Image (cartoon, grey):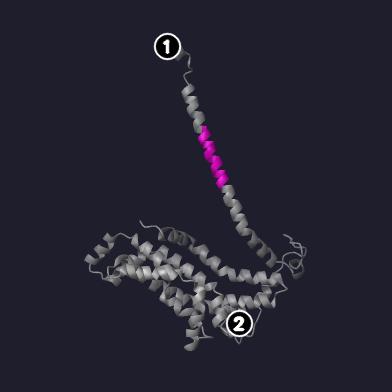
Amino acid sequence: MTDNIKNVPAGAGGDAADKKLRRSKIMRILGRIAVYAVLVLYAFVILFPFLIVIITSFKTWEDASSLTFQWIPEHGFVFDGYKEVFVFRANMTAALPTLIKSFFNTLCYVIPPTVIGLFTSSISAYAFAKLRFRLKNVMYTALLATMMIPGAIMIAPSFTIYDAIEWVDTPLPLMIPGMFGAAACVFFMRQFFSGIPDSIVEAAKLDGLGFIGIFFRIIVPLSVPALLAQGLLGFIGGYNDYLNPMIYLKSSDLYNLQYALRVFAGVYADEQNVVMAGTLVALIPTLVIYFFAQDYFIEGIATSGVKQ
């Protein structure tokens, strides 16, 4: 037995451990390569349509109308489509081009309900998360139950009500309901507020702060990422709204951007380069907002659904 032990090389155990370590490193590297390959493929699948839209927007009418798609157009890259975007005028009395005027209309329709609705949703979420009152759970359950109602079945009764109070052909149906908040926003903000320690709230009460003071001086500063994330989602939802403007806005001077873009696409139905240029111009504002707010957006979404 002693002779067999003496015959085993001194570094045999170390070599086996090194080989096992190298194999584990190689497996980790291969695993990362596989993950990144899948992510790159997934990103390409998502970005591929946008690449087609971008390239088509810089083509001439002849190249855009070709039956075969060409990555590099025969007549080169031009700005003819974008020129049409900024000179197109529908039956508007405003001096501005149609898409520019409708863009400012959209901001007027979206920003007030987004800001006010975020406030009402947040203060409701604060009450459900940190205050104690009778029937709180019942009211919260009823609020969440409204999320199960399809929005399509509310179109007819909503139109009947707005028509009776003469809100049709005005932007009020697009603005006023959103100012009362949204059940989904209340849900996400309540989840975030529930993660704020109650000890902070109790300490603020001892310092003499009331419920409103605690909300504005304690809760809001700690919830900036979640507020920005929900505000961004609300803004994008209103910015991309097409159905409600189509139902309620009859005058061309009141068109929002998405509805005006549909009119624009109908006029230039045979000129795909112009349509793609208009699509990109309409997309730029949301891309710019997301670019500057992406860190807060990701953090707010990640933490809203996690109870700390």
Q: Which residue is mark 1?
A: 2
Badge 2: residue crowd in 10 Å (few <14, some 14–19, many ≥20): some
Residue 195 occupies quadrant: bottom left
Residue shown at 37% from the left, 68% from the top:
141
Q: Which residues are magenta?
A: 22-35
Membership of 305 in magenta stretch: no
Badge 1: residue crowd in 10 Å (few <14, some 14–19, many ≥20): few
* Mark 2, secondary structure of its residue: loop
Query: Which of the two discs, 1 and 2, sits closer to the camera?
Result: 1
The answer to whether 169 is drawn above or below residue 234 in the figure is below
- Distance Cα–Cα, label 1 vs label 2: 98 Å
Q: Is residue 216 visible?
A: no
Which tag, 1 or 2, sits closer to the chain's start? Answer: 1
Residue shown at 72% from the left, 72% from the top:
271
Residue flagged by tag 2: what amino acid is it?
A: Leu
> Is residue 197 shown left or right of residue 112?
left
Q: Which mark is residue 50?
A: none
Q: Which residue is mark 2?
A: 96
Residue flagged by tag 1: what amino acid is it?
A: Thr
* Mark 1, secondary structure of its residue: helix
Q: Residue furthest top?
A: 3
Residue 54 occupies quadrant: bottom right
The answer to whether 207 is drawn above or below residue 159 in the figure is above
Residue 308 x/y as whole percent: 35, 56
Residue shown at 52% from the left, 63% from the top:
291
